[in-house]
Amino acid sequence: MAYETLLVDITDHVAVIRLNRPEALNALNAQLMEELARAMRAAQDNDKVRCIVLTGSEKAFAAGADIKEMSKKTFVEVFTSDFFTPETEDILRVRKPIIAAVSGYALGGGCELAMMCDFIIASDTARFGQPEINLGVVAGIGGTQRLTRFVGKSKSMDMHLTGRFMDAEEAERSGLVSRVVPVKKLMDEAMDAARKIAEKSQLTVMTVKEAVNRSYETTLREGILFERRAFHALFATEDQSEGMAAFLEKREAQFRDR
Ligand code: CO8
């Protein structure tokens, strides 16, 4: 089914999902969230896709939840519909890596969406913020929790309480983003990273994603046990034999996801 608020393209085993509501700086409305969840499920189910890049425009990754749409809602409506929760859970269920390529504004739900991805590559024009406090609300799809884990309590409190924006340099220094590149190079950098990931064994890639995410959900001892078992389990795969043989034979590994 076609999308009205997204552009989706698959090249070199990479699905690029581009948020596309330029008239509202890619604000997240119900239609966009439904389509995004659907596009993520489709990418997960498509055997040709081995990595996903989520991006927006040069001006905005996403300027947050759609305030026009949200402003009319009542407590009963947001509570009973569990506003945006099913859609975000679909994104979090994707087992393939998702890279957020962020240029311009990533505010409120836009910053939260970027943080739901596996890592963030930012352009030097990126600006992150959780300005919900200016609207009389708080972050609602993970901002108070994820930003705090990424940048620590002090900076997270600062961002959520003052509503100020963080530039790309500060975001990289604080650990929110993995790298910053000139705006014109953003998609090349994200695609290079995605292609590199797409060449690996998907068994290993999915295991890495599970293991790193486990570090957010559990104690250090349990996380390390999970990692050790995952390491052991990969010795049951052909890709482990191939990867190590290729190293010893000084050639490129040919992974077959087995
Ligand atoms: N929602 C709806 N429309 C928006 C939004 C938004 N979040 N952001 C921008 N727009 C629209 C503007 O209304 C404007 O439309 P129009 O031309 O029709 O007036 C158009 O986009 C361009 O915006 P501006 O003219 O304001 O552009 P500027 O360059 O002057 O400013 C800013 C850019 C600084 C990004 C500014 O638009 C802004 O402050 N936007 C709002 C940012 C914000 O507050 N975001 C947080 C929203 S709340 C949220 O995300 C909660 C998430 C949790 C929800 C889930 C709960 C479970």
Image (spheres, rainbow, N blue to C red):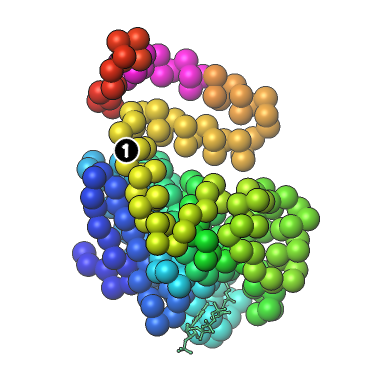
Q: Is residue 160 left or right of residue 244?
A: right
> How many labels, in total?
1
- Residue 217 sits above or below residue 144 on the image: above
Where does the image place residue 136, in percent across and percent down from the top left? Answer: 69, 78
Does the segment drawn in magenta span residue 244?
yes
Return the residue nearer the eye: 85 or 95. 95
Q: Is residue 147 left or right of residue 23?
A: right
Quadrant showing the C terminus: top left
Picture quarter containing residue 59?
A: bottom left
Does the segment drawn in magenta span residue 150?
no
The answer to whether residue 74 shows anywhere in this view is yes
Where does the image place residue 24, in percent across and percent down from the top left? Answer: 44, 80
> At x 54% / y 47%, what residue is drawn?
178
> At x 35% / y 63%, what residue is drawn?
18
Picture quarter containing residue 58?
A: bottom left
Quadrant showing the N terminus: bottom left
Farthest-out residue, right = 154
Where does the image place residue 113, in percent across and percent down from the top left? Answer: 50, 59
The answer to whether residue 113 shows anywhere in this view is no
Magenta-highlighted residues: 229-245
Q: Is residue 9 left or right of residue 113?
A: left
- Residue 29 sits above or below residue 1 on the image: below
Where does the image place residue 72, in percent across and percent down from the top left? Answer: 54, 85
> At x 46% / y 71%, what residue is drawn?
60
- Residue 46 sits above or below residue 24 on the image: above
Q: Main secondary structure of the magenta part?
A: helix
Q: Amino acid at mark 1?
A: Ala
> At x 34% / y 31%, what residue is drawn?
200
Secondary structure, mark 1, is helix
